[in-house]
Image: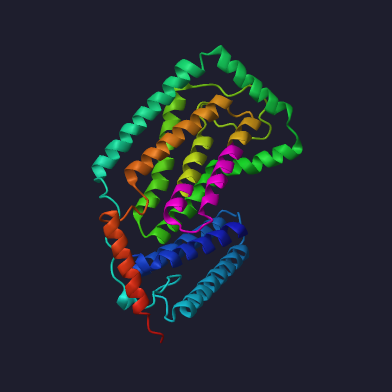
Amino acid sequence: FFDDVLGLTVTSALLLMVFQPVLPAKRWWVLGTALLVVGFGTAAVASGSASLAVVLSAGAIGVLWAGTVGLLSRRWVSDQSGAHAAGWLTMAVGHSDRLRLAPERGSPSPSLARAVAALGAVLVLLAGTVAAIGSFVIVPSAAVQEVDDRIIDWFVSIRSDGLSALATVLDAAGNTPGIIAVQLAAVPIALALTRRRAPAVLLVTAVVGETAVYLVAGALVGRARPEVDHLSMMVPPTSSYPSGHVAATVVTYGAIALLVLAWSRSRWRYAVVPVAVLLVAGVVLARLYWGLHFATDTLASVVFAVVWLAACWRVIRPGPGPGPGSGRERAVSIRNAHTRAWREPPEIA
């Protein structure tokens, strides 16, 4: 419980620091965060799981570390901008009096009702299609089952202690705790970097929709898992077809890769594509290695997850957009903006 209290204290404090500038009723948020940490520690002591000394020392170290990070970040912001930050971990903007609001970029977003209806229709079609393919093509086919069995038998035949350790590491990128951890990090980062809700909505919607398709299709198909030794891996009570882990990996890391490509201007941004592909491939190989899914289960998951992610991107439109006006008009406005910036350099205090 020392690690638990320490982790909860640091995480809660840092999240509060990041979002404090935009939170309403800031004092109540601070009080609520403090009560959360204190309540967790009190429950640990009351249940006999940890001593009071352990809880107090972990909380004190957590507050000290989070406060140090906040002070250093605030000092760095002050040094970089020449002005004090508006809030903890908030980047102050120099020469704010010369800033102008940028025009809305991209085509107008569809209404919320139309977006929900469109994504709902795609979900229904995907769930029905995936379930139909599993029920009428994959499961009844003896030829498909024979190929699936051979692939699983080969993975079982190469098992070793080293490969089992590697498979455990690879599987962590797509299991439930791993996906939740990545989402908890990616959503606030997307909000902070893009200053738009659409990228965060894409990340959440992609995972929620993928989970819905996986649960509906799995319940309708009900395919049994491979009859092999799963070693120490916990076997979920759900269907083998399709693979929820693989689908979640595709939509999570695929969405992150698409957002990086759309928003970043770094020449290294294309590196996210092979990283996302390798993560998906690693989870697929790990699930096959443990004998938790057949090859066709993972293949179907990759396909429907890619389709669902493409639909989410099309409807939600989380990219920065092409910009207003025609190409010539936009080029002229950009050139004029650069000219003004060159002729009117900012004053140095």
The answer to whether 166 appears left or right of 73 in the picture is right
Can you say which quadrant of the picture contains the N terminus? bottom right
Q: Is residue 3 magenta?
A: no
- Residue 112: x and y, percent? 26, 45
The image quadrant that residue 95 belongs to is: bottom left
Dominant secondary structure, magenta: helix
Q: Residue at x 57, y 14 (%)?
A: 143
Which residues are drawn in magenta? 257-283
Q: Residue at x 42, y 52 (%)?
A: 262
- Residue 247: x and y, percent? 49, 36
Q: Residue at x 39, y 47 (%)?
A: 202
Residue 76, above or below 124: below
The answer to whether 249 appears left or right of 118 in the picture is right
Can you say which quadrant of the picture contains the C terminus? bottom left
Q: Residue furthest right?
A: 161
Residue 90 visible? The answer is yes
The image quadrant that residue 330 belongs to is: bottom left
**Total marks drawn?**
0
- Residue 50: x and y, percent? 61, 57
